[in-house]
Amino acid sequence: MGKMDLHDRSPLDSEPQDGTRRVAYVLFALAGILALGLAWLPVEVTIGTFLYEDMFYYLTLAEHAVGGQGVSFDGTTATNGLHPLWMLLCVALASHLEGMALVHAVLTVAALLHVAQGWLLWDLLRRHTSPAIALAIAGFWLFSYRVLTSNLCGLETPLATLAVLVVLRLLLDGSARGQLGSGVALGLSLGFAVLSRFDLLLLASVVLVWVAWDRRLGRLAARRVATSLGAAAIAGLVLVPWFVWSLGQSGVLLPNSHVAVDLMHDVHYDWRDPAAALSVLSQQLLNGAWWATQTANLLGVWPLPMPRTPPSAPAYWMGVSLLFLLMLSALPVGLVYGRHQPASRLALPALGFASLHTAWYVLFIEPEVRYLMPALAAAFVGAGLVVHAVLQTNRARWLRVALAGAFAGLFLSASVGGVLAWRAGYGTTFTHRNHLLLLEAARHLRRNTPPGTTVGAWNSGILGYFSGRTVVNLDGVVNDDAVDALREKRLLAYIRERRIDVLVDLPHQVEAFLSRFGGVADWQLQLEPLGTPFEDASGRRVIALRVLPLVRDEAQPPTR
């Protein structure tokens, strides 16, 4: 095929060979069996390997909503700390199921969404690259343990990731055809993407700017801008029901959970004091470098999953991070090398979104694998397009062999890393083993406390779902009143106002929150240990603390 053929013939005109299609269907079937098998493992296994504690926020909220208590985690206090599409799904399932059956049903949906992601990756890339590239990248995604467990963490991750792929499919197909039509489909997909996870407002921004700028979507700038504005209007209309509900529920447009997360991470750049701002930036970059080791493990750059404080830190994990960055540098090099190929230009919006999304989490929160899944999906699309552009520019056999060998090495390393991560209890993060202790504590509360006991916790999802007691969320993620108490640094007073009898959590969580937000200097004197800690062989602990009655009638004034 000559150079003119590459530009004149749309990639959408090609269809995969029957053999390639059959291989793809076999991969989808095997991936479905694997994902569903994990989804139906006993919760006592999955809660300590890949389920995320926050999953049980959604299930508790859904059960309370179905039971007529409104969208409230503790049955009393309002919250809008949720992503609406995933919440609606959980409510629909909770209308018919409860307990363990509800857990498995949610994970079954997540497993199906994981397979749907693989199918979209394959279908998108086979339209714009080659059957081999499409199969390789979709297969890697489907069978990467860390990708699979991030999708099966029980939260909105698989839905948000699928939404990104749907948007990219519409955008790239429109670019290949030279027109997006009215932009209605794109606007609808962007609106639902944002409702699946609100950080995808960044995706909407990137896509709408690209539509207005990309000349391949129309020669007339005014028409492209009109299409972009039309898609933005449609997306806005999709968001209106959420805005109306959220204003009525919590008085704000966006989830209060983002305020709680900001308070927890306390990342603020005050450039009036450059030294302090640079110190914050340095700390965030170092934290991002450590988290890069988790993404490197997912991608097969390094097969060994790393604990939070590895023995050889920081040289060990910084070396892995540098290796990871070196691998990533191949993408911009490939973009430049294959810049005359259509696939190279198609890669720009996918890689642009992936870069900005990752940068946001590095600079302002932390780039946990679960948070980065939408960016990773976009990066897989972009990587496939870049590889295709490079191979179209240089058809030397040695280059194809080298790239195939590199892919095989990464896949093998990621597979080994997956086995090691399973054994270590690493899924989307490294803290899953703590969840077993929280489950033990929840069951202990159910057996050994009166039904009217009120429990306070920061990691409150598992306790709320399994204890059978009223559990008050204290980090504000699903409790609007707790957000106010954190802002005002009067958390201990709030604990008393809610008549909380016992606090249950990891020791460092209790220490961190009450020291920063408790509002009194001697908060330790107002609590006493209740029973023996829940502890495992590795030294992980969950403690229970009884809230003592005040010696005098008035609470101590908050310390500022």
Image (cartoon, rainbow, N blue to C red):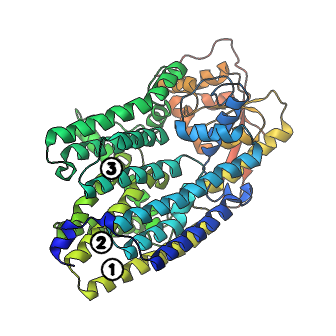
Dot 2 corresponds to which residue?
387
The x, y position of residue 267, in whole percent, is 38, 39
Q: Amino acid at mark 3?
A: Ala
The span from disc 2 to disc 1 (Cα, nearest Å) is: 8 Å
Q: Is residue 532 visible?
A: no
Query: Which residue sits at x=19%, y=67%?
Result: 7
Q: Amino acid at mark 2?
A: Val
Local secondary structure at mark 2:
helix
In this view, the residue in front, 276 or 472, is: 472
| The disc label shown at residue 403, or none | 1
Local secondary structure at mark 3:
helix
Query: Which residue sits at x=18%, y=77%?
Result: 2
Counting other residues with Cα less than 10 Å from the Cα at mark 1, is it few (<14), some (14-19), or many (20 or more)? few
In primary-sequence order, the first of circles 2 and 3 is 3
The x, y position of residue 207, in whole percent, is 30, 46
| The disc label shown at residue 102, or none | none
Q: Nearer the viewer, mark 1 or mark 3?
A: 1
Quadrant of the snapshot with the N terminus: bottom left
In primary-sequence order, the first of circles 2 and 1 is 2
- Left or right: 240 as drawn, with respect to 536: left
